[in-house]
Image: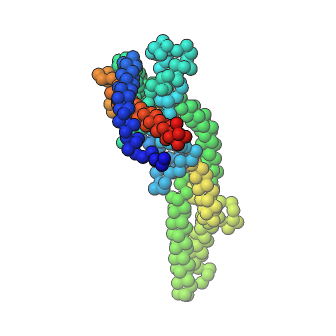
Amino acid sequence: MEDKQIDVLDLLTALNAGKHLILGGTFALCLAVAGLSLLMPNEYEAQVQLLPPKEQKQGFGFADLISSLPIPSLRLGEKGTPADIFIATLKSETMRRHMVEDFELMKVYETETMTEALETLKQQTIIGKSEEGTIMISVFDQSPQRAADIANRYVALLDSTNRRLSREAAQERYNFISNLMERENLNLKSVMDRLKDFQAEHNAISIEDQARAVIRAASEMQLATMELEINRKSLLASGFSTDHSEVQKLDQERMLRQQALALLRDGPGTSSGSLDLHLEENLFLPLRQIPEVAQHYADIEKDVLVQTALMKMLLEQKAESLIEASNTTSTVQPLDPATVPEKKAKPQRFLIVFVTAILGLFATSCYVLGAGYLRLLRKRWGSRQGF
C-alpha cells in the first residue's frame, strides 16, 4: 500500500474538527482571566508636568569673566543638564523615604520593612522627561486623592530640597568670601600704606600734574636764560665791556637762572651749582627723577587698583551670596499640577482580555494542530505496519 504524505488539507481538517475545543478553550480562558482581572484593585494615575529649570551661569571672579566671552563653555566634571539633576533628586531614596513616612505607605502597601515600601513606591512612580523636554511625574495608587497628593508632594519636596541646598551652598560661599575679605583687606591696607609713604617721601601728590608743571617751569627758565644770554651778547657787540654794570647784572641774573634750572633738574642739595632757596616744602619733582619715581608710583598704584578691584568684587559676591542665602522664591515651575483623577488607569481589563483571547486562540490552535498531526502520524505508521 502506497504511503501518503500529510498535507495541509489534513491539518485543516483536524483544525476544523477541533474548532469547538479552540473556541471553547479560548472562551473559558478569557472568562477566567476576566474574573481574575475583576479581583485586581483599580489604580489611578496622577500626573505632574514641570517646566525644565534654566541653565544658570554662576560663579565669581574669573569664572564670570569667562562666561561672558563668546566661546563655548566647557562642562568639565559635569554630566547632564539641570533637568537631569531634578530627575535624579526626585528618584533619590531620600525623596521616597519622605513619601513613605509622610503618607504612611508601609501600612498602605502592607509591607513589613521600609525597604519593601521604598521598592513598591519606586514601582508605582514614573519620573522622566517628555518629548517636549518637560519633567513628568506619574504616581499610581488605589486612592485617586492619595495619588494626586503624592505627586504634588514630590514637587513640594523637590522645591524645598533645592532651596535648602542652595541656602547651604550660599552660606558656605558667604563664609568663604568673608574670610577672604579679611585677608585681602589687610593686603589693601598694606599697599595703601606703601603708597602713602612713597608719596610723603617723594612729594608725589600727582605725578602727571607735577611732571607737567616742572617741565613747563624748566622750559620757561631755559627760555629766560637764553634771552639774558642774547641781551648780554648784544651789549658786548655794542661796545660794552665785560666790566660794565649792565653786563655784570645780566651775568648775575643768568647765573641765578642757571642755578634755578639746575635745581629743577637735579633737586635741592644734589648739585653744587644749584640754587639754595631754603624752601620748607619743594613740590617740584626733579626732572631726572621723574621717570624712576613715576615707574615706582605706577607699580604701587597698580597694586592698589588690583586690591581695590578685588575688594569691590568680593563685596558684590558677598552681597549676592547673602541674597541667595535668604532667598525664598520657588525653584520649581509646575506647568500642570496633579489633580484628582476621575478614571482608573489600571488594570486595563479589556486589553487584558483581548490579549488573552489572542494568546488563547493561538495556544488552542497549536494544541489542536499538534494533536491532529500526531494522530495522523500514528495512523500512517499503523497502516505501514499492517495493523
In this view of the protein, which residue sits in the foreground, 132 or 219? Answer: 132
In this view of the protein, which residue sits in the foreground, 285 or 374? Answer: 374
Q: Is residue 84 above or below residue 42?
A: below
As drawn, is 166 to the left or to the right of 287?
Answer: left
Residue at (48% x, 47% y) in the render: 1
**Residue 49 occupies which quadrant of the picture?**
top left
Q: Is any atom of residue 214 visible in this view?
A: yes
In this view of the protein, which residue sits in the foreground, 349 or 320? Answer: 349
As drawn, is 96 to the left or to the right of 241?
Answer: left
Q: Is residue 267 above or below residue 185?
A: below
Q: Give the number of marks.
A: 0
Residue at (52% x, 15% y) in the render: 111
Give the farthest residue toward the left: 342
**Residue 140 occupies which quadrant of the picture?**
top left
- For the rendered model, the colour scheme is rainbow
Q: Is residue 370 above or below residue 76?
A: above
Residue at (38% x, 28% y) in the render: 21
Q: Position of residue 23 (x, y in %)?
A: 35, 29
Q: Position of residue 233 (x, y in %)?
A: 55, 83
In this view of the protein, which residue sits in the foreground, 103 or 70? Answer: 103
**Residue 174 occupies which quadrant of the picture?**
top right
Q: Position of residue 79 (x, y in %)?
A: 53, 43
Q: Is any atom of residue 286 visible in this view?
A: no
Q: Position of residue 336 (x, y in %)?
A: 32, 30
